[in-house]
Image (tube, rainbow, N blue to C red):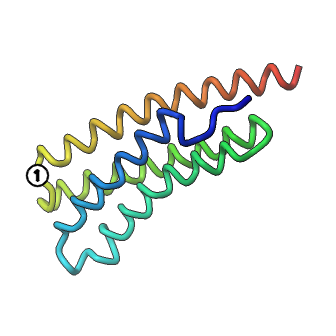
Amino acid sequence: MAVHFTKLEIYILSRGLVPTVYRLTKKLPIEEKYNLCSQSRRAVSSVGANIAEGCGRFHFKDKTKFMYNARGSLFELEHFVILSRDLHYFTEEEANGVLKIINTLRIKLNNYISFLMKQSQRQSH
């Protein structure tokens, strides 16, 4: 029996990242409302959404595709955090805290992708 996505560590970490990003993006100036703020929030929400959708797929290759999408959104979020830091909207400490969580999640997501790929190879044999 497959584990429900809400029990996966990668999903739990992605959910935990959402309030942090929302809190930080509240600090952005009003002119960034539809740029850095909106894009950062969409990216962080997309990570968990892709993990959830991938877990709803039957074949391991389909699941893997959505985990790649989640990883892509994570990289996108990383970019927006770096930009926000570079533009002095986030302090070095704030940005580094989020980047540390992003890196941990990326490692765990890569491990899960590797697991799914191995499962896919077993399924095709």
| Residue at screen point 59% across, 42% down | 68
Image: 78 above or below 59: below
| Residue at screen point 34% across, 48% down | 17
Residue 93 locus on image (x, y percent): 12, 44
Which quadrant holds the N terminus?
top right
| Residue at screen point 28% across, 41% down | 99
Q: Say left or right for 27 vs 12.
A: left
Q: Extreme right residue here?
A: 125
Image: 80 above or below 28: above
Residue 41's image quarter? Answer: bottom left
Front residue (pair 101, 1): 1
Q: Extreme bottom residue here?
A: 31
Image: 102 above or below 89: above
Badge 1: few (under 14), some or many (20 or more) residues near its Cα, within 10 Å? some
Badge 1 marks a residue whose secondary structure is loop
Q: Say left or right for 41 vs 68.
A: left
Residue 88 locus on image (x, y percent): 11, 59
Q: Which residue is mark 1?
A: 91
